[in-house]
Amino acid sequence: MRIVVAGGDGFCGWPTALYLSKQGHEVSIVDNLVRRKIDEELHSNSVTPIASLEERVQKWKELTGKEIKTFVGDLNHYDFLRQVFIQTEPEAFVHFAEQRSAPYSMIDREHAVYTQSNNVLGNLNVLYAIKEYAPDCHLIKLGTMGEYGTPNIDIEEGYIEIEHNGRKDTLPYPKQPGSFYHLSKVHDSHNIMFACKVWGIKATDLNQGVVYGLHTNETEMDPILNNRIDYDGVYGTALNRFLIQAAIGHDLTVYGSGSQTRAFLNIKDTVRCVEIAANNPADKGEFRVFNQFTEYFTVQELADKVKVVADKLGIQANIAHLENPRVETEEHYYHAVNTKLRDLGLEPNLLTDNVLENILETVIKYKDRVIKENVLPSISWK
Ligand SMILES: NC(=O)c1ccc[n+]([C@@H]2O[C@H](COP(=O)([O-])OP(=O)(O)OC[C@H]3O[C@@H](n4cnc5c(N)ncnc54)[C@H](O)[C@@H]3O)[C@@H](O)[C@H]2O)c1
């Protein structure tokens, strides 16, 4: 299959591009490299040293004989995107290319506006490009479980049957996102649903949980293929952040009580879920939603797990509770359905001590790269 991976230089996109290429797909990466520029803006870095995109794809070709084409440019430049579609004639377009940090979107007006214009308008351009240049292309769009928030009822996969005043309908599941970033994903979902209805586009919205982990079988083949791993208070996701804090002897910083429950998955499952979606496309005009996660944990449970594994490696990790910089409910009900990807063959990589130990060992190897001032949260929602 001819597959474009937009955002293919990022944390989820790079391992996905390699995995799909390994499965024999003709993969092209589109990326404007803005994530690397944001590292400069925040004076931050990936714990693992990451090679340039050119070096990465060259090494992949050297090791496997497989070519990944690269298009460096912005989804918001429609002339560029048009050329990508004309040259690649995609059968699937995997869309990871968005600003994905909730704290980044909450820094100030400028960052909120950037996040929503980059994400919402970029996605709208993708929808138009599919309509105009590849109407049979299947859009596989990364959404987030954060679109739903934490309602006091079970979270369904995209839609819910509602009975109101004696009548029934199946409607999009209500959204209660918790940041301007999460809101951008909700706006995207609405635009995609509408485009499916009016233009007959095929789309799968992957409402992904928080991704942890670092390596996949492919990125592990050579240090040049290293994936990035973020740890700072802006881009570091909970579990990865705790592991890096443990590695450098910093307290594991749990926000508030730590009872917040979130859905998680291993990066190895991210790449597999995208493959499953690509191999089982949505129908013409169908806006399909999959909840892409394998387990859920409270933030406190994650910190406890990291503490246990750190102990095994001779590191004494302390858990500290910080005032929560986010505005979020800490004590809440959480139960979300995630059967669709499993029904299509996903076999989850669950969070065992072994998995955590492996990540921690890699992180320890690179711990001198950690910029300690960046570890604490610096952005408040208020
Ligand atoms: N990492 C997670 O835990 C997680 C969880 C749920 C959903 N997601 C979603 O998955 C996707 C990928 O996340 P990630 O962690 O890999 O993020 P990332 O920031 O590491 O990667 C995103 C990539 O997209 C590129 N990009 C951003 N805007 C672009 C644009 N306008 N044009 C071209 N390229 C652009 C960036 O340069 C970067 O390489 C995002 O859409 C994110 O919202 C991620």
Image (cartoon, rainbow, N blue to C red):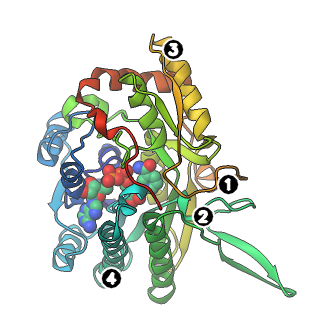
Q: Secondary structure at mark 2?
A: loop
Q: Where does label 1 land, which residue? A: 336
- In this view, the residue in front, 36 or 284, is 36
> Residue at (60%, 36%) from the top-left corner?
300
Cα gap from disc 3 to disc 1, whole angstroms: 32 Å
Q: Secondary structure at mark 3?
A: helix
> What's the residue type where badge 3 is placed?
Asp
Q: Secondary structure at mark 4?
A: helix
- In this view, the residue in front, 348 or 89, is 348
Compare marks 2 and 1 and give the one earlier in the sequence. Answer: 2
- Res 312 seen here: yes
Q: Is residue 289 left or right of residue 46?
A: right
Compare marks 2 and 4 and give the one earlier in the sequence. Answer: 4
Residue 311 numbered tag: 3
Relative image position of residue 315 (x, y in whole percent): 44, 14
Label 1 CA crowd tier, 10 Å (few <14, some 14–19, many 20+): many
Cα gap from disc 3 to disc 4, whole angstroms: 52 Å
Cα gap from disc 2 to disc 4, whole angstroms: 26 Å
Q: Are marks 2 and 4 in contact (CB under 8 Å)?
A: no
Compare marks 3 and 4 and give the one earlier in the sequence. Answer: 4
> Residue at (56%, 48%) from the top-left corner?
293
Q: Are marks 3 and 4 in contact (CB under 8 Å)?
A: no
Which numbered disc, 2 or 1, marks the residue closer to the eye? 2
- In this view, the residue in front, 244 or 274, is 244
Q: Where does label 2 land, which residue? A: 148
Q: Where does label 4 land, which residue? A: 128
Which numbered disc, 3 or 1, marks the residue closer to the eye? 3
> What's the residue type where badge 4 is placed?
Tyr
**What count of labels does the image hold?**
4
